[in-house]
Amino acid sequence: MKKIHIDIVSDIACPWCAIGYARLELAMQQLASEYEFVVEWHAFELNPDHSGPGEPILPALARKYGRSEAEMRANQSQMMTIAKALGLNFEKLQERLTCNTFDAHRLVKWAGEQGQQTGMKQALFEAYFGQAQNVAEQDVLLSCVKSLGLDTEKAKHVLESNQYVDAVNKDKAVYQQMGITSVPAFIINNKHLISGAQEPSTFVQALREVGHLAFKGVEKI
């Protein structure tokens, strides 16, 4: 079967990244009889300098984007509605606090070696958006590991070491150099970029076009 490789650049703190993957997943299901998909996640930090205690998300977003809290609440409510229709748990999207996601990205790298990269990403989305848990805290991260049936002692060792620090930093540098400044970003067959949480139908059309051109030997759309 023809194979399509999809690199996903995303942050655990990005609701649209969770929505974007859920939509991509629907598209991949529609195309499952035509293509085999290989998905690889890459790190991006929306708030890389975050440290210390978290701040309530609505005032933090209002300040970041220069908008009112009411506007941000409406925006988040819209995302909650979209997420629910996709089967995602965003129940506490507006109750979460800002947090650092670097260690969570390290665990995604580690989980990838266990064949659970996507599972780890989804568990982290669930913890942060569905339960408003602080995904910078070791206990929360290990709970996500446990939910996937992975070895929590090995994961704890990763978190207490410098493992995957270089890998996460490399991701960040590579995609910044490529000019990616917002996520999610989907890179198809290492050639074609799809930006944003597109509708499933848009993904289907784009993947079919990219797949057709790739197997015809054409380099660019």
Image (tube, helix red, strand yellow):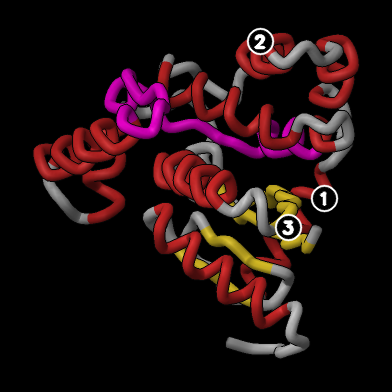
Label 3 close to label 2 by CB (< 8 Å): no
Residue 47 shows in this picture: no
Residue appearing at x 59%, y 54% in the figure: 31
| Quadrant of the drawing holding the N terminus | bottom right
Which element is circle 1 on? helix
Residue 182, disc: none
* Label 1–label 2 contact, CB within 8 A: no
Q: Amino acid at mark 3?
A: Asp
Label 3 Cα crowd, 10 Å radius (few <14 / some 14-19 / many 20+): some
Label 3, secondary structure: give it.
helix
What residue lies at 51% left-to-right and 40% top-to-bottom? 50
Q: On the image, numbered disc 3 is attached to which residue?
A: 171
Tag 2 or tag 3, which sits nearer the N-term? Answer: 2
Q: x%, y% of residue 199?
A: 37, 55
Give the magenta-colored segment's residue range: 84-109
Is 105 displayed left or right of 185 in the figure? right
Q: Which amino acid type is shown beneath numbered disc 1?
A: Ala
Q: Nearer the viewer, residue 155 or 209?
A: 209
Q: Kindly check if marks 1 and 3 are in contact, taking CB atoms under 8 A apart as contact.
A: yes
Please give the residue where the numbered disc 2 appears in the rendered image: 143
Locate residue 137: give its quadrant: top right
Residue 89 colored in magenta in the image: yes
- Vertical placement of residue 146 versus 207, above or below: above
| Element marked by disc 2 | helix
Q: Nearer the viewer, residue 164 or 39?
A: 39
Estimate the x, y position of residue 40 in percent, counting from the top left: 73, 50
Q: Residue at label 1?
A: 167
Give the residue displayed 20% in from the left and 55% down from the top.
66
In percent of width and height, residue 64 lies at 30, 51
Q: Is residue 106 above or below residue 3?
A: above
